[in-house]
Amino acid sequence: MSRESDWIADGRAVLGIELGSTRIKASLIGATPTEVLAAGAHDWENQLVDGVWTYALDAVWTGLQDAFAALAIDVRRRYGAEVELTRLRAIGVSAMMHGYLPFDADGELLVPFRTWRNTSTGAAARELSAELGVNIPLRWSIAHLHQAVLDGEAHVPRVAHLTTLAGHVHERLTGRRVLGVGDASGMFPIDPATGDYDARMLARYDELAARAADATGIGLTARVRELLPTALAAGEYAGTLAAAGASLLDPSGRLQPGALLCPPEGDAGTGMVATDAVAPRTGNVSAGTSVFAMVVLEHPLDRPLEQIDVVTTPAGDPVAMVHCNNGASELGVWAGVFRRFAEALGVGAVGSAGGAGSPVSADAVFATLLGEAARSDVDAGGLLAYNHLAGEPIAGLDAGRPLIVRAPDSELTLGNLVRAQLYGVFGTLALGMRVLADEDVALERMQAHGGIFRTAGVAQRVLAAALDAPVAVAETAAEGGAWGAALLALYAAEAGGGIHGEGSAGSARPALADWLHEQVFAAASAQVVHPEPDEVAGYAAWLERYRAGLAIERAAAASI
């Protein structure tokens, strides 16, 4: 304990922050990167306001301050009241990718934050994809901007800069308007040869924006390149914690400025880092409010694919991304229903009697439900479960309605119900991954992380069946994106350009993939699950029913 407490007291600990869809998390690491010294969190939820999925920026800072305060409390709880978190060696910020955060010249947000979950940019995405020759997804920042241009929104001429949520937080902490290249690749296409925004496409977009302005009379007053943050690769100098930033993160005044910050990244990038999946032919699946798979490419795709985004790793290598707007949230709702049922029965812990209204562990509920699913029919007994709270572009859905559908002869059991929900978590992902398989994209291993994998084996087996590929879950998988952000910050401090961008920058910097493999994951263990033939066949049969039943989803969205 004295080693860890000394590390913290001496200001050598590294902080990772992630603003996820349902939680803002802070993780502190020290001499052993795979061990989290302390953690803090704050729960939050997006809101549907005037038809737009959004978070208030005030809630961003309230949540960050609460998560940091919880982290400081955890430090004192673990290491003694005299140990204060006052200095940090480095900080990494990660957040939900994509979306639309336009600011004017005075730094005022022009419209409420439009998150990745919004699917109102169809016209813009179609035009951009056709004109730029690459797939531009609905949630990308450039799609949101161009939709605002096409619609002639009044705020468009005042747009002075765009960023992502991670970029905004980083700018407030450091004063620097930069972005990790992985996150930047969800704003505008990146040229892998330069690691910067694609120059040809930038010029083409300026032409499209001018044409749209001629039609509406309202247009941008700057070239798109001037609106975008500077893209940086992992390890490059991205600034230090300013005094104002320290006060913003920790209003108590204990946190001192000066910590190095790495380039801010999206949750996809920190997920790749947290699973050691940044080298070609590796991939990972992140399962949370959304679900996405990242496959690092050996070679560029031969053609644009509507279901596949091409983004980059934090080091700038091209990645094929299958992104699904809907993930494990609906499964979590059902777990909450069964948790309340257990409490109403007076069950204090699953399987044991207790007083009426006794608390029931959420982990125990999940473990029980997933255990039932493991013993159910491999085709879920004919049940279908759609987890679509929002629209799902890969499935061709503009809006979502969570549904459970069964035929009269389906076997409705608890296990089949939960298995159908688990299958639904990965349903749209499986559709997208089959597109990549048809393109002969090479993949040696698939890593998985996210809370759904905390119950050993069950969700992992389902994912292996859905992908018909081995799936590994490392012992560090539950640490998630905040830990991944801390690793990127540690990489910047140890292998990057130092506090002033000097030192081992450039060619002397070890590759991110090599550094992770040698310095972080060399001794890490993982549980690998190989697909079982009967489960692969069961999932394939279920997926065909799922695909055919998407018409039910469309009808529900039109009717309800």
Image (spheres, rainbow, N blue to C red):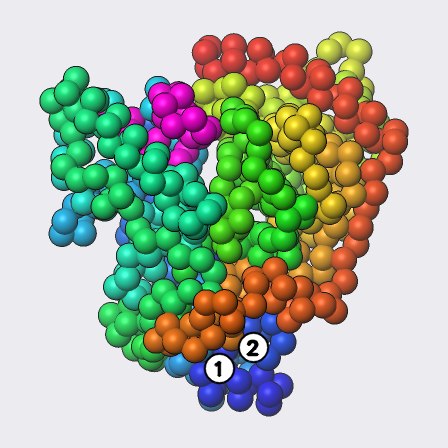
Please tell me whether residue 474 is drawn above or below residue 491 in the rendered image: above
Q: Is residue 90 left or right of residue 284?
A: left
Residues in magenta, as a range: 126-149
Which quadrant of the rendered structure holds the N terminus?
A: bottom right
Looking at numbered disc 1 in the image, what kind of residue is underneath it? Arg
Q: Which mark is residue 12?
A: 1
Looking at numbered disc 2 in the image, what kind of residue is underneath it? Gly
Crowding around mark 2 (Cα neighbors within 10 Å: few <14, some 14 to 19, many 20+) is many
Residue at x-position 79% and y-position 54% = 527
Q: Report x, y in % for residue 418.
A: 72, 33
Please tell me whether residue 334 is drawn above or below residue 69 in the rendered image: above
Crowding around mark 1 (Cα neighbors within 10 Å: few <14, some 14 to 19, many 20+) is some
Q: Which mark is residue 541?
A: none
Check disc 2 and report the residue beneath it.
30
Residue 33 is at least partly visible in this image? yes
N-terminal-most mark, 2 or 1: 1
Residue at x-position 51% and y-position 75% = 494
Q: Report x, y in % for residue 111.
A: 23, 38
Residue at x-position 42% and y-position 55% = 180
Q: Are marks 2 and 1 in contact (CB under 8 Å)?
A: yes
Q: Secondary structure at mark 1?
A: loop
